[in-house]
Amino acid sequence: MLAGLGFRRILHSKISPFVFFQIARSVSGNRASKPSPDIESLVLRQYRDGKFRDLFRAAISEPSFLLSACQNLCLEEIPPSADSINRFISIEDIAFDLREGRLDVESLCVKLLPSRKKGTHLVLPNLKLKVVIEAVRMALEIIYEKRFATFAYGGRVGKGRHTAVRYLKAAVENPNWWFRVPFRRQALDLCRLKAALAEKIEDDALIGFIERLFTSEAVVIELGGLDLGRGFPQESSLNSILVNIYFDGLDQEIQEIRAQIHRGNPKLRNLEKAENSLVFHKPVRVYAVRYLDEALIVTSGSKLLTIDIKNRIFKYVEGNMNLKVDKLKAHIHSAVSEKMDFLGMELQAVSPLVLHPPLSEKAMRAKKKHLKQKAAKALELKNARETIRKKLGLKIMKHVFKKLKRVGGFKIDLPVEGEVRELFRTWAEEVVVEYLKSKEDCYHWHKMLTYGNFLSLKRVRDQLPESLVDAYDQFQEKLNKHLMPERASKHVEDNEMVEKDEEKRYAKRTVEDLIELCMRVNAPIELVRRAIKLAGFTNSMGRPRPIKLLICLDDSDIIKWYAGVARSWLDFYCCCRNFKMVKTVVSYHLRFSCLLTLAEKHESTKSQAIQHYTKDLRIIGENGMEEVYFATEKEIKMLGDRNLSDPKPVDGAITMVLVRLAIDEHSPVCLAHFCESTNNTIYRVRLLQNRLNVDPLKEDKWVPGMGAIHEALNRKCLPLCSKHATNLFIGNICLQDIDCTSFLNAD
């Protein structure tokens, strides 16, 4: 809820990090990308007689398929080669074990004991098993991705939280009632999942492997909890696709309900095309959004209709899916008078006037004042220009007449006659153009110059010389061309049309404010403030304070940790209406908490810390170049909802601190997937819930909706290279991207 993944690059030198941050927002989110055609063909060629057969041995066990899975797990821009991967695991051995059915899942798992006596243990797969799990996920994605419903989000490429929010804001019209489908904390029904898989897949080896993953607890799916889609190590990469498969039957049921209601309430197309129609037709519509195990149903009909839809959905969930619904949280709410918590954000139906308010009286006075000052400045410049021209012209004429009077002429070496003539011609044209802008003056002079018009009479024209008549006709053409009164009347008509269009737009906007409702999405500011207080960013008065646990870190690591939390919030809530309030929390509370922490470390004052690091928190890197990790105040002001980024939320960014250990031993291998670096540093994981001795399941002492990393990883030691440690600090990667089974025991 409270964090999203940050940018994808390490920022070096004096280059502004804002460019990298914007690039990262457009690509962050689901790590899974579209499979290559070769990998996709390995799966699709197993489709026979309406089902996919023998996938495990014919497709997933192929070395090329496993190599692609390894490259998906790797976090580098350039995927590792097969030789570098074979230094960690043998792809050929894994392929042989899969084909022969000799892969022992239990032996490839590591069981971590809890840090408390009443805690629960955690089972994590090692790197070899992670590769096989990723290969299974890729195969299932190829099979099911095009079969999922359009309103099913989460665990899909380009279908994340921000895409769901954008759909709610753009597609939902006139919502009246809504309700969620909340589940009690319960494990996913394995038998029902196997039945759902068997509808499309006929492969006992694949389904048996998935069953062994559940029995060994290498894959655990808990519905109604706070672990899905957050990047925690207790969540497997297979969870999202399996949840979507499990809920696909519910999605089809919702689609059937929507189609049935929409057929009974068709749109009147002819009425919609009539812009001036006084009849307003709002057909009943049903909207649905599901993100993994969170589902929201919105209707524009009556409450009785909403109750019928709710009963039908709950009956399917409890009867066909064998799931228990938390009916205390499943009430039907008014979309106008009550807020709805969904996807970690607050939704409410409001009139368009709230989303696009008119200018206040103060703003209108300021606008009029600005326009008046602008016109006065333009008039002042015009008068100054005319004064300068007049003075210069008089000087030239005075000089010419003086020379002619005294000596009867003058000679100059430079040919200035053409320049002077061009200068006067330009001035004259500008004066004429400026004068012709006044339509009233044009109309007056046209009337004066055409008064009488006796030369248009035939008997008069016959008595005059032909040259005089031609000259008069040419004069009339020029007169009508430049001073025709129709031009003035046309200008007046244009002004009247503009006023009428403005009146129509005002009337249309007024009617829309009365009959239409739009969706407003806000960030839960109170929960954000509660989170920063719980994590120690602020004191009881709500003012920034230092975090003493971070004093043992390097200056750069302190700034990176704060930058990761800050950019996570900025990236996650950029689609909210009250994004400015989130910017204030980041720009003030987090920035000054970081400065106070640095000041506490070096036993200095806040002013001295600001003078040394500046408010942008700039530091000098090992290469002597200036580095910036924390978003500057100018960058924060420029951020907004400008793209369809799908950040992968990591609540662990605020609940986890890596403490650097001073251990003078041999340097183990970096635990990031397939990283060959040996120049590593050992960090100890410190979790917020263990430091505060708080159970995250108790919402009165924790932040509602915020997840937490499993307590079994508390105080575990992880060797990391400088690159991946930086990425972990700033939120580019999470513990899910690290082989946590190879941790060290250091006292």
Image: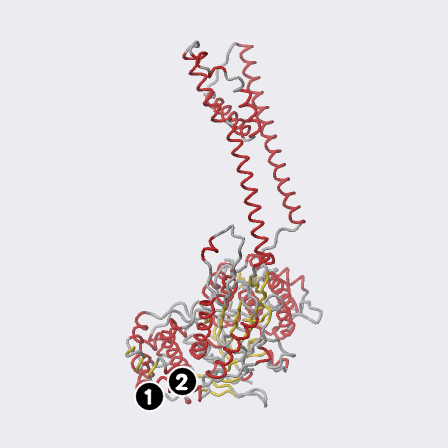
Q: Amino acid at mark 2?
A: Lys
| Colour mapping used in the image | secondary structure
Say above or below: 144 vs 217.
Answer: above
Q: Amino acid at mark 1?
A: Gly
What residue is at 62 percent from the left and 74 percent from the top?
535
From the viewer's perspective, is 62 left or right of 609? left
Tell me the mark number nearer the camera, choosing from 2 and 1.
Answer: 2
What residue is at 58 percent from the left and 20 percent from the top?
394
Q: Is residue 334 visible?
A: yes
Residue 194 disc label: 2
Q: Position of residue 537 (x, y in %)?
A: 64, 70
Say above or below: 294 vs 22.
Answer: below
Which tag, 2 or 1, sits closer to the chain's start? 1
As drawn, the residue found furthest toward the right would be 541
The quarter of the displayed image where residue 581 is located: bottom right
From the viewer's perspective, is 411 left or right of 703? left
The quarter of the displayed image where residue 710 is located: bottom right
Q: Label 1 crowding class (10 Å Cα cut-off): few <14, some 14-19, many 20+?
A: few
Quadrant of the frame with the C terminus:
bottom right
Mark 1 secondary-structure assignment:
loop
Q: Position of residue 68 (x, y in %)?
A: 35, 74
- Mark-to-mark CA distance, 2 and 1: 19 Å
Q: Position of residue 536 (x, y in %)?
A: 64, 73
Mark 2 secondary-structure assignment:
helix
Q: Position of residue 55 (x, y in %)?
A: 32, 81
Q: Is residue 2 visible?
A: no
Residue 101 disc label: 1
